[in-house]
Structure formats: structure tokens, C-alpha cells
Amino acid sequence: MASASGTPPEAARLSVVEGDITRLEVDAIVNAANSELAPGGGVCGAIHRAAGPELAEECRRIGGCPTGEARITAGYRLKARHVIHAVGPVWQGGEEGEDDQLAACYANSLSLAERHGLKSIAFPAISTGIYGFPLERATRIAVTTVAREVAATNLEEVIFACFGEEVAATYRKALAELS
């Protein structure tokens, strides 16, 4: 069923915000995590710094997460109640299953959000920083996967939190292509 704007209802729940993911008031923010779930650089480091040392301690107790999967923790000092740690693939040229692994990050994060009764979630551009995944390709995978998977959840809001105008513009373009 289409909304008044002609977009499917699941697409209406998707939006793009340029800014700091750690400041969003949502049920969960997604961390572009490493497989050890250890504090790192980029968005991962920012989330750990904003959440406080308790986040790193809970992550140590979890003991890691394979590429393509996700784990959930408390949000501690963040405005978000939870952090979902999704381990994206390191870009190897596109012939090592990176697309499927990246899609799995988004799908598994949404599944965790659903299992925990969450209503809102914010994603960063997983794997596009130091992991080297090409931005446009990663964005297309993120947007199409989330648009497909969110329909099977009770999530009311999905935000793509973008660091910088170039990333935000890429996400806006991919969302516009859905309709």
C-alpha cells in the first residue's frame, strides 16, 4: 500500500540525517564494529568515547562477533538506550562476498532491534571508512537491504546517520531511487 506521497510505507520510515550518530535520541544506534568489539577509530571510537568505559567492558564480556553478524549492548551514557554492534566486511575488491556480508550486517541489526522491541534505529555508513568499501556501492546495499527488511519489523523509524555532506547526499540519492 502506498502512502499519500506514493512511496511504500516502509520507505516512508527511512530518513537521512547529517551529523553525529552519538547524539541521536533513538532506541539504538548501530556501531560499525570490529570483530573483537573493541574500541577503535572512526564511528566505533566515537561511540565508545560517548558511551563511556562501561560499553567496552560489556563488549569484552560478549567476546567478539563474526563479520556480517551483530550483537546488542546497553547504550550507557548515550542518548540511545542500546548499541547494536555490526561487523562489516573489509573491502577486498568485491570478489570475497563483501556485498552479502554487508547486507547481512543491516539485516541482522534490524532483526536484533525487532527481537528487543525497539522502535527506532540509526545506522552509520558501515564499512565505508577504514574498511574501504566503496561508498556508492555500500549505500545501495544498505538502503535496499533496510527497505526490504524493515517491512517485517515493528520499527517506526530508521535513520541513516551520515558524517559529512557527501555521504548524506549519496544516501539521499539512494533513498530517492527507491520510490
Image: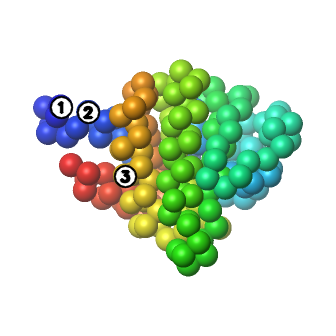
Marks 1,2: beta carbons within 8 A: yes
Left or right: residue 47 compared with residue 23: right
**Residue at x 82%, y 34% (from the top left corner):** 58
Q: Which mark is residue 49?
A: none
Q: Residue at x 55, y 31 (%)?
A: 113
Residue type for callout 2: Pro
* Contact (Cβ within 8 Å) of mark 1 with mark 3: no
Let me know if residue 72 appears in the view.
Answer: yes
> Most extreme residue toward the top, as rendered?
117
Q: Nearer the viewer, residue 164 or 7?
A: 7
Label 3: state its secondary structure: helix
Image depth: mark 1 or mark 2 in front: 1
Q: Earlier in the sequence, mark 3 or mark 2?
A: 2
Q: Which residue is mark 2?
A: 9
Name the residue that disc number 1 marks: 1
Q: Kindly identify which residue carries mark 3.
A: 144
The residue under the point 40% across, 36% down is: 150
Choose the circle earlier in sequence order: 1 or 2. Answer: 1
Q: In the structure shown, which secondary structural element does the residue marked by tag 1 occupy? A: loop
Q: Quadrant of the N terminus?
A: top left
Q: How dense is the environment of label 2, judged by Cα within 10 Å: few (below 14), some, or many (20 and up)?
A: some
Q: Quadrant of residue 174?
A: bottom left
Q: Quadrant of residue 54?
A: top right
